Image (cartoon, helix red, strand yellow):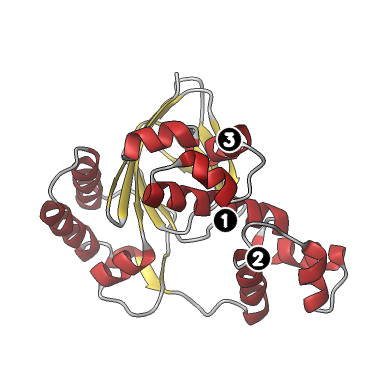
Amino acid sequence: MNQFFYKKQKRIKALSASITDFSYKKHSHGEYAIGVTKRGIQHYHLDGNLQLSHKNGIMFFNPEQLHDGTAHDEQGLDYIMLYLEPSLFLEAMEQKDYIRFSTPVVYNHNIQQHVMNLAEAVLTEADECICDDLLFNLADNLTINTNKIQNQDTLIKKMKEDIQHNIKRLSVESISEKFSMSKFQFIRFFKLQTGITPYQFYLNNKVDYARKFIEQEKDAYLAVSECDFVDLTHLNRQFKRVYGLTAIDYLKQIR
């Protein structure tokens, strides 16, 4: 049986999940994500490289870092995740520039406890002051696994921005023309640089935009028209492949 339980506290979201036969499709998040494998083995590809997080493994994901995910075997998998908005995470880390987690999986009991404590506080809707303290404690112990991010290639950064600014509808041809490329030159270049096609990047961002809209407006039906999905079924299908549950069920949990 697959179970997904989300809670949100301002700029922090927590997930408690138990999966057996569910597989996340290739996607990315706008937030920094930190998780702990509680039972089983987390099997996923990060930027195209296979990663395995065994019990007590701490998983680190940078914003827009491409990954999928599933249980490694039929025994299934239990894990928790924290999703931290970049502005909040950098503030807690006392950093002005973006930083990157340098190692995908680490085993460190101290960090594990800080991640678990903060996730538990968010999931149980603890007071904001408590969550702030726990986030500070976590950030204070994370410097061993971070380094400053290198400036992203200017061209691919501009391409991503153009796609994100047209989140309702994607015109690969118009964007490719802007960069003096044919449609397929653009698709090939984008995938070579990012690991996914422009359409996959667009769809990931569209679902993420819908998630933020739902959290703010508390209305999944309105998100259908706002984000230009065909209908609620279309939104739910795309939402589930990234978050494990439908937009409607997600809304019920984060109200």
> If the image is split into quadrants, where does the N terminus sit?
top left
Asked whether 24 or 52 is in front, the reply is 24
Residue positioned 53% across, 28% down in the render? 22
Q: Which residue type carries mark 1?
A: Asn
N-term-proximal mark, 1 vs 2:
2
Q: Is the residue under label 1 in contact with that under label 3 (CB below 8 Å)?
A: no
Report how far apart the C-alphas of labels 2 and 3 lie in the structure: 23 Å
Q: Residues within 10 Å of mark 2 (few under 14, many from 20)?
A: many
> If the image is split into quadrants, where does the C terminus sit?
top left
Asked whether 98 or 52 is in front, the reply is 98
Report how far apart the C-alphas of labels 1 and 2 lie in the structure: 9 Å
Residue 135 figure quarter = bottom left
Residue positioned 58% across, 35% down in the render? 232
Place of residue 6 in the rendered image (x, y in percent of width and height, measured from the top left): 34, 38
The local secondary structure at tag 3 comes to: helix
- Disc nearest the viewer among 3 and 1: 3
Q: Circle 2 is placed at which residue position?
A: 163
Q: Is the residue under label 2 in contact with that under label 1 (CB below 8 Å)?
A: yes
Q: Which residue type carries mark 2?
A: Ile
Q: Circle 1 is placed at which residue position?
A: 205
Q: Circle 3 is placed at which residue position?
A: 232
Place of residue 157 in the rendered image (x, y in percent of width and height, measured from the top left): 61, 74
Query: For this view, does 188 lie left or right of residue 206?
Result: right
Q: Which residue type carries mark 3?
A: Leu
